[in-house]
Each structure stands twice: as structure tokens, then as C-alpha cells.
Image (cartoon, helix red, strand yellow):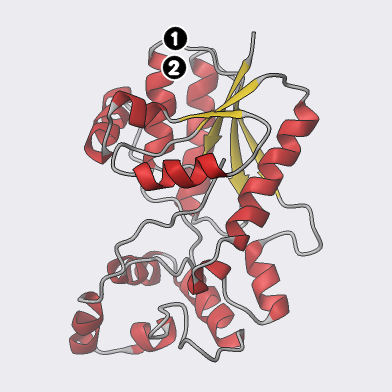
Amino acid sequence: MGNFVASYGGGTNSTAMIIEWVGRGRRLDAVVFADTGAEKPETYSFVALFSAWLVDHGYPPVVIVRNDGMHGSLERECLTNGRLPSVTFGFSSCSDKYKLRPFRKWLKASGLQNVTVLLGFDAGEPGRKSRALKYASGYDKIFPLIEWQWGRARCIEAIDRSGLPRPGKSACFFCPNTKPHEILALQDNHPDLIERAIALESNAELRSIKGLGRAWSWKDFVCADDAQQRMFGSVCMGQPCGCYDG
């Protein structure tokens, strides 16, 4: 018999996927969260809460894995090398290095055989499924939310029914795909993190872009007056993070 492992991102989709999987009484041998070292405090708190929820339901707790290279975190690597995350430029090496590689390293060391990995892409993300299937991985991949035809709203409903709080968006606090209103929320709720994001941006050697906003810098944005912030708010930055977990 094979083993089932959930690639857990700590956000809405993967949480709902696991809740429903558990509700159906399906086997789950591990839930693995790859920590970039740059999640917001709310995400870390929710991962711990969800881990306890899993144990209460007779399932294994969340396993947290990290990159064990010379930098240890994506933020430290960016600061050391004077760069911004690769996703700023349309690449995915940060996701590969700080999510995919630690996950696969843990999986190899786990001794689990005939592994099937659950990926939490919802019914509105067929493109992410297609990209995921292009990667040779040594394990099978399934997409329960797509199979169940669950969109975002259905995922939120499942979390609400479980009695758990909504986890919110899981992403690095300096993610270039952060929406303008999310930057303002970060400034209000975590001024220390917005300072670190701006420090990372200011430290980077930039030529083709202006900052984490690509065509504009986060520093200019958070220093703008109300009128300017409304102007920035019209900029379309609604795409999901897109980090690949499996």
C-alpha cells in the first residue's frame, strides 16, 4: 500500500483540502510545511493550531522543513546577495530552493515508499496543475480540490464548518505579488516586517525594475500620501503568489 503526503502551504486552499480529506476518513501519512523563514506571524500561529487539530483527529502533526544551506532563509539570501526574490523577475528559483528542495529532501529521508503527494490547487487553477505535472519528481501527484471541483469559496466554507479560524493568505512578507491593500495592512499590523521588506528592497542592486512593486518601490508606496496610495491601489497586482509546493 502506498503513502499519502500533503504538501501544506499554510493557506486557505491546502487547509481546506486536508480538512475535507480527513473528513472523508482518507489515509494521510504526513503533512509537510516548507518554511521559507519569511511567513507572517499569523501563518506560523495557524500552522501550529492546525497541527494540533490534526492530532486531535487522529492524524500526524505538521512536519516543518527548511532549507539547510548556507543562508538558511530566503530573506538572508536576498540580503547577502543584494537581490530581490526571483519571482520579482518572473522566475521561481526561490520557490524551488526554499519549498520544493526541502520537501523532497525530507521525503527522501522519511523512508516512505510509493508516495502520492496531495497538492492544494483549486478548481480555478488548472494552469498550476499543468505546470506541476511537468516536473519529474519521483512520486505521484494528485489535486483533490480540482477533482472535487472546489473553488475558493468552497474552501472557505469547509474551513468555517471545521470550527477553525480562517488562515488567511500564506506568503513571504516581502512577496512581490502582494496587493497594495495587503502592503498597507502589513504596515499597520507588522511595522517591523514592512521595515525589513523595505530594507531588503533598498539593499538590492536594481537595474530593470524599481523595487518589490516591479514598476514602483514599496518604500515610495508606504511613504506616499493618501491620494498617491489610492493611485497605487488601482494597480493590478491580484495574481496569486504561485509558489510551487510539490
* Residue marked by disc 2: 22
Q: Residue at x 34, y 31 (%)?
A: 146
Residue 104: give its label: none
* Residue marked by disc 1: 25
Residue 136 at x, y = what percent? 64, 40
Q: Residue at x 44, y 17 (%)?
A: 22
> Mark 1 near mark 2, Cβ–Cβ under 8 Å?
yes
Identity, as a three-letter code, of the amino acid under mark 1: Gly
Residue 135 at x, y = what percent? 59, 44
Mark 1 to mark 2: distance in Å?
Answer: 5 Å
Please name whichever residue, 105 or 233, is drawn nearer the observer in this view of the structure. Answer: 105
Q: Quadrant of the N terminus?
A: top right
Residue 122 at x, y = what percent? 34, 38
Residue 218 at x, y = what percent? 41, 81
Q: Residue at x 53, y 49 (%)?
A: 244
Please name whichever residue, 163 or 86, is drawn nearer the observer in this view of the structure. Answer: 86
